[in-house]
């Protein structure tokens, strides 16, 4: 029997999911802080809009690029919220941010070419590079600076084989928001190598303490930036699988072509839900934002008060990247905390070499669960 291709075999399961499966296999009382998913349900007005659309016959294929009214809602939200401006034909509605990333990678990275990204980073980037038959290149950022974007370090690794660079701000897993000057330096250098910057901005709406700005709006070369967005995190719509890719018309035209052979189009019903989320009442989402910010403040304060534990202060998203002072690799210690102390975290090694020794905590959970989870983490560190 013919073996699966190397592009598939080289991909590995995420260690986030390894911990998820371990947690699912036990009936113990666990505090689940490993998965990055809002604990809020989608607001009722969004659900009602989707149900109404379905009852009124919106149950058919849409164009490959998505409903014009959905793209219009995305266009207007990107411009108003993040300063990123596009025409309708420069936006394609996708099946979540993951498909947007997949399409962006397929369209920019050829066989043997490099996809660069600062580490630690979401493991999906490595897999996407493999699927494009490209080479993933993690460029580790410095723990001493809290994993902020070191433009010089990233630019020095660029070369003729660099096809695209992924920048994720706010960052998963560190929660850092990248400095605008560093972002500009990376985009400028990518332009010199005729490389694209894939701006993963699915957490942009969860930026604390400053106005969020899209990478394309910060750059003098927006035509070299492809923006990945999603309703999943900011709007508590992970299960609706609704995202988007926005960029220069020349590449979006090519992306729309290959969608005919992938997913064809995003769910028509999910697109109507997105229209309501983006254009309807925003108060429920503002309440979610306020809750995440309060949780961020609580988690940061608790970390500061636990001996043997530190983390860069999260500036966005809903993650804290913990540095426990223990003599163990991150997967071993994560399993120990689950088995002995009943708290589930994601191992830092699952986010690349720069993450080894650390643990990602998701504070997309209730304040009560966060308090209990941090109590258990403190006890685990003390007892290890």
Image (spheres, grey):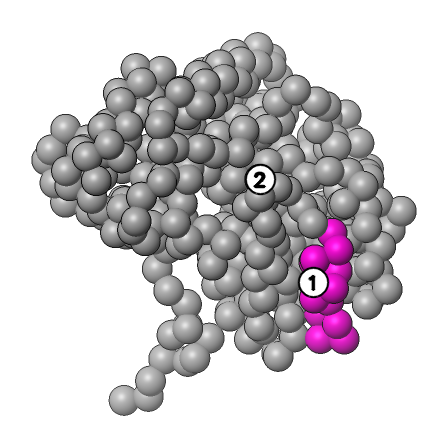
Do callouts 2 and 1 mark residues in contact (Cβ within 8 Å)? no
Seen from the viewer's position, the closer of residues 260 and 384 is 384
Residue at the left extreme? 27
Q: Is residue 66 above or below residue 274?
A: below
Q: Is residue 138 visible?
A: yes
Q: Is residue 21 above or below residue 153?
A: above
Which mark is on residue 164?
1
Seen from the viewer's position, the closer of residues 312 and 260 is 312
Residue at the bottom extreme? 1
Where residue 188 appears, as percent x and y from the top left, is 84, 55
The residue segment tinted magenta is: 151-163
Where residue 45 appears, as percent x and y from the top left, is 50, 16
The answer to whether residue 29 is left or right of residue 195 is left
Which residue: 82% across, 66% down?
194
Q: Can you tell which quarter of the image residue 289 is in?
A: top right
Q: Is residue 254 above or below residue 346?
A: below
């Amino acid at each position: 029997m013919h073996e699966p291709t190397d592009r598939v075999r080289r991909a590995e399961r995420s260690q986030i999911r390894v911990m998820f499966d371990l947690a699912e296999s036990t009936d113990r009382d666990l505090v689940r802080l490993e998965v990055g998913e809002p604990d809020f349900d989608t607001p009722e007005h969004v659900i009602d809009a989707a149900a109404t659309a379905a009852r009124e016959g919106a149950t058919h294929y849409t164009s490959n690029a998505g409903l014009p009214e959905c793209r219009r809602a995305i266009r207007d939200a990107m411009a108003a919220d993040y300063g990123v401006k596009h025409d309708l034909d420069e936006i394609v509605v996708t099946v979540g941010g993951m498909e947007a990333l997949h399409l962006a990678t397929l369209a920019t990275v050829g066989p043997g070419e490099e996809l660069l990204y600062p580490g630690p980073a979401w493991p999906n980037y490595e897999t996407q590079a493999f699927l494009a038959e490209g080479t993933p290149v993690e460029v580790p950022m410095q723990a001493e600076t809290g994993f902020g974007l070191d433009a010089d370090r990233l630019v020095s690794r660029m070369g003729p084989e660099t096809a695209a660079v992924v920048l994720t701000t706010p960052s998963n897993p560190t929660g850092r928001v990248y400095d605008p000057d560093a972002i500009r330096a990376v985009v400028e250098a990518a332009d010199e190598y005729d490389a694209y910057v894939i701006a993963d901005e699915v957490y942009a709406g969860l930026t604390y303490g400053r106005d969020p700005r899209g990478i394309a709006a910060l750059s003098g070369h927006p035509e070299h930036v492809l923006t990945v967005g999603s309703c999943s995190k900011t709007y508590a719509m992970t299960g609706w699988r609704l995202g988007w890719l926005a960029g220069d018309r020349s590449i979006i035209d090519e992306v729309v072509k290959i969608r005919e052979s992938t997913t064809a189009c995003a769910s028509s019903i999910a697109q109507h839900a997105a229209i309501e989320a983006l254009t309807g009442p925003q108060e429920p989402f503002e309440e979610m934002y306020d809750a995440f910010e309060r949780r961020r403040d609580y988690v940061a304060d608790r970390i500061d008060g636990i001996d043997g534990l530190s983390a860069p202060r999260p500036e966005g998203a809903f993650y804290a990247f913990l540095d426990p002072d223990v003599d163990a690799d991150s997967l071993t210690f994560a399993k120990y905390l689950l088995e002995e102390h009943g708290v589930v975290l994601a191992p830092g090694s699952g986010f690349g070499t720069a993450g080894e020794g650390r643990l990602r905590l998701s504070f997309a959970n209730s304040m009560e669960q966060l308090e209990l989870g941090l109590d258990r983490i403190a006890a685990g560190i003390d007892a290890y």
